[in-house]
Every structure is written in C-alpha cells, then in structure tokens.
Amino acid sequence: MTDNAASVQPPRALREPRIRRHHGDEFADPYEWMRAKDDERVTAHLEAENAYTDARTAHLEPLRQRIFDEIKDRTLETDLSVPARRGDWWYYSRTVEGKQYGIHCRAPIADPEDWTPPEPTAGEPLPGEQVLLDGNEEADGLEFFSLGTFDVSADGRLLLYGIDATGDERYTLRVRDLETGETLPDVIEDTFSGAELSPDSRYVVYSTVDEAWRPDTVWLHELGTPTASDRTLFHEPDEKYWVGAGFTRSERFLVIGVGSSITSEEWLVPADDLHAEPRVVWPRTEGVESDSAHAVVDGEDVLYILHNQDALDFELVRVPVADPGGERQVVIPHVPGHRLLGVSTFRDWGVVGYRREGIARIGMLDYATSSVREIPFYEPLYSVGTAGNPEWAPPLLRLGYGSFVTPSTVYDYDPATGSLTLRKQQPVLGGYDPADYAQARVWATAQDGASIPVSLVWKRSFGDAGATPRPVHLYGYGSYEHSIEPSFSVARLSELDRGVVFAVAHVRGGGEMGRQWYEDGKLLAKRNTFTDFVDCASHLVDHGYTTPEQLVAEGGSAGGLLMGAVANLAPELFAGILADVPFVDALTTILDPSLPLTVIEWDEWGDPLHDPDVYAYMKSYSPYENVREGVRYPRILAVTSFNDTRVLYVEPAKWVARLREVDADAMLKCEMVAGHGGVSGRYNTWRERAFELAWLLDVLGVA
C-alpha cells in the first residue's frame, strides 16, 4: 500500500441495530441511524470520515496539484461558445480566466439573412454585447451555485432564470427585464428545473415537486401577480409518474409530459390560450412510451410521434393534431435492433436520432417523402446530436460532435447541400494531437453467451492496447437505458499520458445495443449488469490488456450500485474501485416510498415492498447487505454529497462503515455543500476530479 494507512486509524461508526422486517425476512441494520440528517452525530461522523480521507491521501496532494494544473493548462480559460441565433440576437456564453462560472450573453445580428455566427477576437466581447446573466455575480457569497432555468422570451425582452444555492435541486425563479436591467418582483420558490416563459411573455410555466421529490404539478404564473394566485395547469396524483412541460419549437403548443420508466403520456394546450383545458394526445397505456413533436405539413398541424406500442425499438408515425388518436401514418417502421431515439421538427424538415450497431446516428427527415438521409461521420466510435437550434425556420442545423480522441466539435449542417461547416472545435492547449491517441471497440463474451461491447482509448506511444498488460481504468453504468457515448475529456488526458488505458464496459441495462439490451439488465434480470461488467474485466485480463493489480473500476449513481455489486462478486479482479454518489443501499431505499423518487424507481428495479420475489432478488445483490466476510476487497473510495436528493449520502456512509467491519480498505469523501452532480464551479470541479484521479493513479501504481 502506497499511502500512510498504517499511521491513521479510520473512524468506527456507532452501531445501533435496527430490525427491518419484510415478507418474513429480518435484517439487522446497525447503521440506519445515519439517515437522520439533522442528527449532530451524523455530521460529526461525516466530518470524521472526511478528516480520515484527507489524512490518508495527504501524500497525494502534489499529484493532485499536478493533475489540476494539467487540466487548467490544457483549457482555454477565456473562451466563447458558438453563438446560436434566435430572433434578432446571437446567444452565447463565455468564460473568463480565473472565474468559476459562465457568463451568458447576446449580441445583435447584423442582417436578417445572416446565419453565419460571428467569430470573436480572443478575450474580447462581441460587438454590441449584452450580458444577460453573470454566474460569478449571482454566485457571489454562495458555497454552491447551479443554474436550473435560463430562458429568454420570444420577443427578447425578458429573462427567466432559476438558481439552486445548496445542491438540493430546488430552484428559485426570478425574471429580469433585459431592456432596463431591473429584476421584476416576481419570485417563485422551490421549483423544479426547466421553467419557461410563454411565447407572448405574459406567463411563466413551471413545475414543483412533492415530498418524495417527484415533479407532480405544472403551474401557470402570470407576471405581475402574486404567486398565491398561480393556477394549476396539471397535477399527477399517481406516485409512479413525474410531470414536466415545455413549448414546442413552433411556439404553437404547450406540451405537458407525464411519464414513468415504462409509460408516458402527453397533453396539449394551445400556446395562445393557456387557460384552456389540456387535451390528451394518446391516453396512457401501461408499458407504452411516446414522445411527440409538432410540425406543419401541407398546411396541416401534425404531430410526429415516436412510440413503442408493439414496436420494441420504437416506430415513428404522423397524426393530425386535430385527431391524434385517429389513423396513424407510419413514417419510420419498427426495425428490431434499430433503436429510434428521438425526433425534432422544424418548419421545413425534421431530424431523427437513432442507434445502430451501438453508435448513435442522426438523419434528416423529408416531410414530403418520409425518407431519412443519414449524416455520415467516419470515425469508428463517435457521438453526435443536435445542439443550439432554438429557431423554427433556420436554413442550417447546428450539430455537436465528438469522440474519445476528437474534442467537442460544433458543425452547421446545410440540408440543401448536405455540407458540414466547422464552426468550432474545443481548444486543447499544450500541443494536443488526436493522432497521438487511438480508440477501438472489442467484444467480451458474457456468461450466457451475449457479446458485450467494450470501448478503449489509449496513447499510441505506450504501444497498442492489448500488446502488453497495462494499467486500465474501466468505467460502467448500465441502468435506465442510458448509453455511455464516446466523448472527449481533457481530464482523461492526465491518465492516458501516464500510460493508462481508459475503457467503457457497455453492459446490459444501458441502451447501447437497443431496447432489448436495456430490458435484459433491469428488474429480475438486473444481475446481468453486474456479471457483464465482471466478464468485461475478465476479458481484459484474459486477453492481456491488464492484470487485476493494474485494473481500477469506476461508476457513479446507479453505476455506483454496479461498483458495489462487482466488489462483492469479484473483489479479486480489481485493485481499486471508485464509487461516485453510489446507490449501494438500494433495497432499503426502494422499500421506503416516502424517500425521494422511490415509487418512480419501482419500474426500474421492481417493487420489493409488495412483491416478495423482488425483495429476495434485490436483497441478493444490494451491496450493503452482501458485503462478504473473509475476502480481500480492493481499495475503495466512495464520494458523495450531503445535499444529494437522488442518492442520499447515507447509502455510501453505511456501506463504508460495513466494509470496515470486514477490514476492507474503504474511504468516504463527503462534500458538505453539494448535490448529486458534486461541487459547483469549474475550478472546484477540476479539483474534485484531480482528487479522484490522483487516488486512482496511486492505486494503479503510476502516481
């Protein structure tokens, strides 16, 4: 062991056995007392854990500083995003060296026919720049700052913004008059993220959460009136469903979306009559998901609806707004393994996102012929999507592109000619050359014969991956059909340049290989997620990419559950495990419907409260219950946040305490003012990642 473990003793948590009884089973839980967030003993214990982690990792401070400096030195600190046009303005954000947060700005267009974004002079504002919101000024005096809503009215006169100052994802909404610079008296507390101004600038549409942190109500606030008179637009009483709302790009309708993990429903309200009763598009059917986009085709208002009714990987249909439940015109039929992801509509054409052969792709939809023309890209691994397209009738489509070796890139695509115009590529200072790095995909065989894709990226000067055993950092998630896309990371270069191979195990439960890939890693098939990851790790060892002494695993949130599970299943395969905001006390959480998001989560994990089979299955893998005696665990670092409302701090705190009972080398780092996404501010975020990477490199022996 390379740190000073011998001289520092870990805190020993107080044991207060409590018995959990369900379905005839009893489980003694000595650390459940830590759930009492207001108990002084809890904060004292977390502070003791932080002090222990600080002492154990003090020797890594020089390395942490070097990694932070590397991230900083590779980043163009004073920079500008590619301006996106809306109305008579170019909207963009910029950063300034030494400042934590972005500055949101706009500048006037030069000509109504001009769709070429202005190119700034380094460090200089654009001509006529107007600062809309400076995150540094708003964050002054706050330990945490997160912007959850940023919406400019259609006429460009008002700014709606929402701020979270603690990390608990509850936002305070305010409205600013951009002509006078004055903040209006309207203040709306405790909202969810994603509020919007109505197209006529008279109203704010926002949502709030219930006691379980479920967005359950959509509200209509008329500017200049007291919030006590706000009108309920929609309330969802079923605890399995969340709600949200937003205006169509055409600004013709407000769409109220209702959804669970497996079922969704939409309601339409005319944007010019927000007091009208919402009208359902398709009544909800258990297990059927649908998502619509408004378009005008041959003068008729239509909805393009993506749905999975009798179509596992989804089908795209077109229906009239006047009769959405009537005859459906099939636009893109269901093709097994060809997962349709989403549709965006503009005045003259649509854009379809889909996944084929494990890669997300994008195509242009012709309204007249219903044909789709794929936009080609030529790297073996890449990610692409639409970004920054607020206008209803633009001549160009803004795209975001990147890969493990290609920095984030912005293109404008011309549907008329099929040409791509490079607008900007993320600057990487210090002489970065993509040709110095390589990416590839290999396939591991799971216990049941399934082929699991594993993505790899490495620096070529250390030799080809697999030519000789190398340190490997293996990342995984595997839940909610979330796919880990090939994306670039400046911080990752600090690993690659030290000879580490970064790998992603695209395990079942994610969405990389289509909807069935997700279905095969959830509910009573959840163990596939964990065994897939173990099989990917074994493949890398068996085929000479690495050794167990040179392999560290990482995952966060539901991926943290994955980390806890594989630590119990195959501790001998890993030298270290980094678990970020880990969902490691899963059964306790999912049994309690009063906890944030629990009932919503039953569609993903099952309902152990009412189903004894689900209870037994979850108990068989939940990491906290299954810590093993008599095995040598890898070194473990769990990172959490005290104000996290998605995965409560108590889960990793209990898990680390339990691991210590079996003499595992486990540490806990708890941010006391932060949420699920960790600390706020870019420099703070870099330091947080430098802390994690220094620990990881130390475990790998390349510190």
Image (cartoon, rainbow, N blue to C red):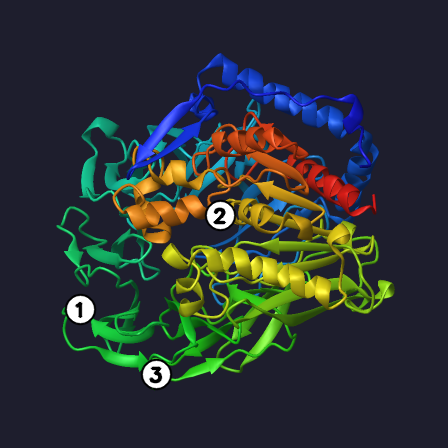
Q: Secondary structure at mark 3?
A: loop
The N terminus lies in quadrant: top right
- Left/right placement of residue 442 relative to residue 652 reads right
* Residue at the front extreme, as displayed: 630
* Residue at the right extreme, as displayed: 461
Q: CA distance from mark 2 to mark 3?
A: 38 Å
Identify the residue at horizontal 65%, vertical 71% (top origin): 441
Identify the residue at horizontal 60%, vertical 76% (top origin): 377
Q: Hey, what amino acid is under mark 1?
A: Pro
Q: Nearer the viewer, residue 184 or 232?
A: 232
Residue 81's place in the image compared with 49, above or below, is below
Q: Hey, what amino acid is under mark 2?
A: Ala
- Label 1 crowd (10 A; few <14 / some 14-19 / many >=20): some
Residue picked out by circle 1: 324
Residue picked out by circle 3: 370
Q: CA distance from mark 3 to mark 1?
A: 18 Å
The circle drawn on residue 558 is 2
Could you tell which of marks 2 and 1 lies nearer the N-terminus?
1
* Residue at the bottom extreme, as displayed: 369
Could you tell which of marks 2 and 3 lies nearer the N-terminus?
3
Could you tell which of marks 3 and 1 lies nearer the N-terminus?
1
Q: Secondary structure at mark 1?
A: loop
- Label 3 crowd (10 A; few <14 / some 14-19 / many >=20): some
Q: CA distance from mark 2 to mark 1?
A: 36 Å
